[in-house]
Image (tube, helix red, strand yellow):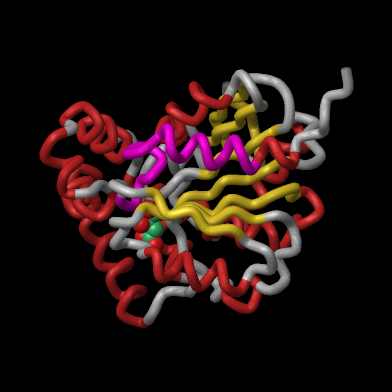
Amino acid sequence: MKTQINGITIAYSDRGTGLPIVFLHAFPLTRTMWAPQEEGLCSQFRIITIDLRGHGESDAPLWRYTLEQTADDVNALLDQLSIQQAIFVGLSMGGYILFAFYRKYAARVKGVILADTRAQADTAEGKDGRFQMAQTAYKKGPSAIADIMMPKLLSPATIQTRTALVQQVRAMIEDNQISGIAGDLMAMAERLDSIPLLKQITCPTQIIVGELDQATPPSDSRLMADQIPNARLAIIPNAAHLANLEQPEAFNHIVATFASELAPKKHS
Ligand code: MLT
């Protein structure tokens, strides 16, 4: 489905009924990375997946991207869908957006799932890397970005043995426009340090990380789990950064358990 939000077209999917769960995807992917979650969870919950601005079937304007603006897009979409409160799942960049969303719209957040992400801002070196990658996107296009990103997203075993999944992730990256890729990099480089926010996250929180994640390693998740009051941490074996795609059953089980505890109880 497509809608107009904050002056651009935003594409999203809305499947199932019950407690809404909103999924925010990673860089530089699209909402299709959540296909196993949509498929596995839509019989129990209302699953909303969004092509964030700059991605997939949504518009990718040239200028200018901030995580706060993406949070505003998500908030406006929830208004349009008449959803007051939801559980939010943010993976990696989706997690950074979730922090920005929580700063502005905490009342809308019933529960938070932070997957394969981190609260720290970029270091100076990290920011330089962003600008270099934006230059690469500009000069060589999305397939050069796929070459750089694939080993960061999936484990070596997955890259060697799961050809269909590797092709699917590569296609998602190649589906994005250069303006969106560069825009994300700009937005991530400028993002705030969310460490001071962690102690203020008062809603139920689940943290998930693939044990082999090198982009946002388990130590980053432990740091969040230590600082967010009452947060739970689950480490998924045999998964790297895209734990939801490499181990969808384990990932879905954690999400479903967490969300079931927050869903209104049905009375017979
Ligand atoms: C992501 O998966 O969203 C990115 O690896 C995040 C980042 O580059 O910091």
Question: Which quadrant of the figure shows ligand 1?
Answer: bottom left
**Image spot of residue 82 (x, y percent):** 80, 31
Given the current orientation, which residue lies at the most extreme right position?
267
Given the current orientation, which residue lies at the most extreme left position?
160
On screen, residue 201 versus residue 154, left or right, reads right
Question: What are the residue bounds of the magenta stretch?
Answer: 240-258
Q: Is residue 131 above or below residue 102?
A: below
Q: Nearer the viewer, residue 192 or 164?
A: 164
Q: Is residue 147 magenta?
A: no
To which quarter of the image does residue 200 belong?
Answer: bottom right
Visible residue check, residue 56: no
To which quarter of the image does residue 56 belong?
Answer: top left
On screen, residue 109 versus residue 100, left or right, reads right
User: Who's the residue at 69% across and 68% down the image?
Assistant: 229
To which quarter of the image does residue 158 belong?
Answer: top left
Visible residue check, residue 159: yes
Given the current orientation, which residue lies at the most extreme bottom position?
124
User: Who's the residue at 28% across and 36% down the image?
Assistant: 169
In which quadrant is the C terminus drawn? top right
**Image spot of residue 173 (x, y percent):** 30, 40
**Image spot of residue 48 (x, y percent):** 61, 31
User: Who's the residue at 25% across and 44% down the image?
Assistant: 142
Q: Is residue 126 above or below residue 185?
A: below
